[in-house]
Image: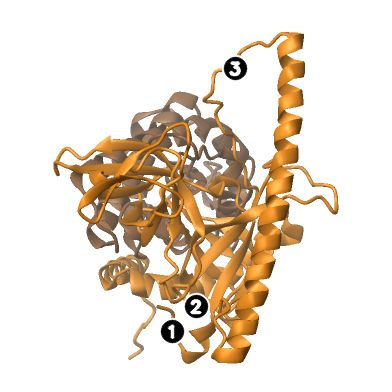
Chain colours: A orange, B brown
Amino acid sequence: MKMSVKPSRTQVLAGLMLAAALTSFLGPEVGGRLRSLVHWAFVPAGDLSGTMYLATSIERQTVPVERLSADQSRRLQAENAELHRRINTLEDEVCTARRVFRNGKRVFSQLFGPSDDTPVRLISARVVAGDSLPYGWTRLVNVGQKLGSRKGMWVTNRRLVTNRSKRLPENLAVLSGTALAGRICETGAFTARLQLVTDKGFAIRAQVKRIINPRNPRRVQIGARMVRLRQYRNPPVEVFTRGDGTQWLIAGEVNKVHNIQPGDILQTRPEIGSLPVAVDIGKVVKVSDDSKHPGRSTLWIKPAVNLPALREVFIVIPGMAKLGGVR
Amino acid sequence: MRWIPFLIFAWLFILIQMTLGKILTFDRLEMGPVGPDLLALMAVFVAMNVRNVIDGMLAGWALGFLLDLTTAGGAGGVTCVGPMAISYAVGVWMVFRLRETVFLDRALPQIVFAGLFCLVTHVLWVTAQSVLGSGEMSLGDYGGAILQVLICSLYTALLMPLVYFLLSRIRGWLIIPPPTRSRSRRSRQ
């Protein structure tokens, strides 16, 4: 008697549905491993001369534009030129001061103990694809485990003075600092998945640096007393922040005595082992009362990086990564 | 179904959705990003033209699984793999059952089917990810995600007539055509 072992299509469908239900219940950890197995099928095409992935960003103009007279325009241009000159002078001074400080620190480290320089290495990576569904904020980058990326590593982006999408002229100084873009949430052999700071699952314990504006002095509570905020007396405020899945980071239950205001900067805490420097994450744009917790407020933070147009990123490999894990 | 060409086209569609298709996504909306689901259009096309419902559900499962494998962020944080495969199979079954009631070559039923398919499958997916995903999800967040689904479904539905027209040019490559009503040799004798 000949037995047929070929399953019918109904049986195949039932098997596949069961398998899908099983992988669903096994959770995101197993899902991540499955995803990293098939990254190779999409990355080469996405990385095709860096052109196939189209990152775009259209920013809405929120400031009302007034028409200026010729005189006003000329005056503003002159004022801008003067301000640019002052900024350049101040930046030069800051650079010189930093260089002196760094040199002194290096000499101190060499003389008296182990090096205290930033123990990280940056790997350049490129975003090659986005999520297929629009409900999350993750991106696929073309650097995987083979080049050293691991789950939990931070990813930064060089912030540019200009955000125009055209190719910039060479030798133009456009860097204005580094900002946090997200962290690696899954890794394959040759690719990794980057979870951006606005993704629903992103959370970080960070600090708010209050900006001192001489025109708008503010009083804050330091210790038991209320004092005027000054440059030398401006401790960072620790907050817990998470992405809200739209385009903001939210920091909830922040004590009002800290008097955080729009314009203050959210940064990473240097105490984080895997990123031991204060890197900008975003700027506070709105502070609202927390209705559930009296005396507390909620901060709405706009990311420093233009996330929809993100292309080039840097994966931060901490000095201790060789030991196997990332804190 | 012609499985090899179907899988090649599915791969092409998902590739476009992850790369070039991002130009169709609006990222700066208050409710969150809104973009079309091109694979839903392909699934609806299959459901409206396939001869056998099991074949259609298998094709839907494959398309949904591809979406699961290429999406890591979602309603409940990092997502798990599997819910969209099940949702797509169910969605194809639903459209297959409904298709007898309308003229398939008209734009309106195509839009309605695409919108309905997208709405049902994505609501199922968002609900499953809210329960099974890694992040915390409040009722307000869930409501926001459902609103996002609603707008995405509408957006996807509006693209359906164009994609249906393009796919119908290559229908023979994807789906085995139904038998013609020509007289058989025996009946002619």
Locate residue B150, reporting x and y percent: 35, 35
Q: Residue at x 66, y 56 (%)?
A: A94
The residue tagged 3 is: A65
Which mark is in front, 1 or 3?
A: 3
Locate residue B110, reporting x and y percent: 45, 32
Give the letter of the chain under mark 3: A
Q: Amino acid at mark 3?
A: Val
The residue tagged 2 is: A150
Locate residue A72, reporting x and y percent: 71, 13
Give the letter of the chain under mark 1: A
Residues under labels 1 and 2: Cα distance? Answer: 8 Å
* The disc label shown at residue A325, or none: 1
Q: Residue at x 22, y 41 (%)?
A: B140
Task: Name the N-terminal-most of marks 3 and 2.
Answer: 3
Locate residue B141, reporting x and y percent: 26, 44
- Quarter assignment of residue B44: top left
**For the residue labelled by badge 3, is the local secondary structure a helix, a strand or a loop?**
loop
